């Protein structure tokens, strides 16, 4: 099975253009499945020997190991993709993994910052140093465009269209979109471009660390935590909280779901619909707290 997993990962990398993060996830999932087969069945590492019964026992085993429903669902999704690939290659016949059912997911709504807290956070970032100006520009851009942190750090100088108020964003699956980020973000981006000091000529990254090279996603998360603590806000909020807050504030402000989907770069409208649950809950909370008959 090891050779077939390598071929599958190569297919994802070369033909599906999967990101390094996605490839690592698939590799981890498939390696765990191969190890399980080796330890449980010994000879069962040949993909042609895997049947629906063995896949069901693997699902039960995952549950017994204490994995969350979302983790189990991801591992099963990896198996479905792997066996679909094997079928297209003519290695297995039939849809071996097609009958796998995901465990029921608990409904978890995304963590948010209120509009007031979001504005207070941005306004609290000190801008008396060049790195402070960078931080203000970064977080204004993240919130202004609802960007993933990976999209933020991937922005290059040539991606910014100041006059139009747009940034070319490279999202998941290398899909590109033009994203408006608003005048506040563009204002601070212009300030940062004046302060920006790359470590070498030709450095194209927009946002740099203190060494003058492209900043990492981990550094952005650490910096956000520092600014949250300074403002007295929940330090467990992550860069993705800014994206969630953007989407919810847009819908609360009257934006339609399809537009928010496009702005977030979601391939499916279903992914965006979680924010309708957020806004409905906020409406119910407001009603219950304010109406005399609630």
Image: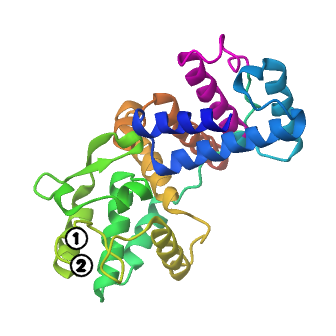
Label number found at residue 203: 1
Farthest residue toward the bottom? Answer: 128
- Residue 173 appears at what percent x and percent y? 40, 40
117 vs 128, nearest the viewer = 128
Relative to residue 38, is residue 219 depicted above or below?
below
- Counting residues from the N terminus, which is met first, the one under dot 2 or under dot 1? 2
- Residue 58 appears at what percent x and percent y? 82, 33
Point 57% across, 42% down: residue: 278
Farthest residue toward the top? Answer: 94
Is residue 92 at least partly visible in the picture?
Answer: yes
Label 2, label 1: how many angstroms apart (C-alpha)? 6 Å
Point 69% across, 44% down: residue: 31
**Which SS does the magenta portion mostly show?**
helix
Left or right relative to 237: residue 16: left
The residue where tag 2 is placed is 198
Farthest residue toward the left? Answer: 163
Q: Secondary structure at mark 1?
A: loop
Q: Quadrant of residue 138?
A: bottom left
Magenta stretch in the rendered image: 72-99
Could you tell me which quadrant the N terminus lies in?
Answer: top right
- Residue 149 appears at what percent x and percent y? 43, 59
**Alpha-carbon neighbours of circle 2 within 10 Å: few (<14), some, or many (≥20)?**
some
- Residue 246 appears at what percent x and percent y? 42, 52
Point 42% across, 37% down: residue: 266
176 in the magenta segment = no
76 in the magenta segment = yes
Point 56% across, 78% down: residue: 232
Q: Quadrant of residue 53?
A: top right
């Amino acid at each position: 099975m090891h050779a077939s997993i390598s071929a599958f990962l190569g297919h994802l990398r070369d033909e599906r253009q999967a990101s390094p993060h996605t490839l690592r996830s698939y590799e981890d999932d498939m390696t765990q499945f191969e190890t399980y087969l080796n330890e449980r069945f010994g000879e069962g590492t040949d993909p042609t020997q895997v049947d629906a019964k063995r896949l069901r026992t693997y699902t039960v085993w995952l549950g017994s190991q204490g994995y969350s429903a979302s983790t189990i669902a991801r591992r099963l999704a990896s198996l479905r993709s792997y066996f679909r690939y094997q079928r297209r290659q003519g290695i297995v016949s039939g849809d071996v993994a097609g009958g796998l059912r995901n465990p029921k997911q608990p409904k978890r709504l995304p963590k948010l910052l209120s509009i007031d807290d979001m504005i207070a956070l941005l306004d609290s970032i000190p801008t008396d140093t060049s790195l402070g100006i960078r931080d203000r520009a970064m977080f204004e851009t993240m919130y202004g465009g609802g960007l993933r942190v990976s999209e933020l750090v991937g922005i290059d100088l040539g991606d910014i269209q100041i006059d139009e108020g747009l940034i070319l964003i490279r999202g998941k699956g290398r899909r590109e979109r033009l994203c408006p980020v608003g005048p506040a973000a563009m204002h601070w981006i212009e300030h940062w471009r004046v302060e920006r000091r790359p470590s070498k000529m030709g450095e194209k990254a927009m946002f740099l660390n203190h060494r003058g090279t492209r900043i990492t996603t981990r550094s952005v998360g650490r910096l956000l935590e520092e600014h949250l603590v300074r403002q007295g806000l929940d330090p467990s909020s992550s860069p993705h909280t800014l994206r969630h807050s953007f989407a919810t504030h847009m819908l609360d402000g009257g934006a339609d779901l399809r537009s928010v989907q496009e702005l977030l770069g979601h391939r499916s409208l279903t992914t965006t619909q979680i924010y309708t649950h957020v806004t409905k809950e906020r409406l119910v909370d407001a009603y219950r707290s304010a109406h005399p008959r609630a």
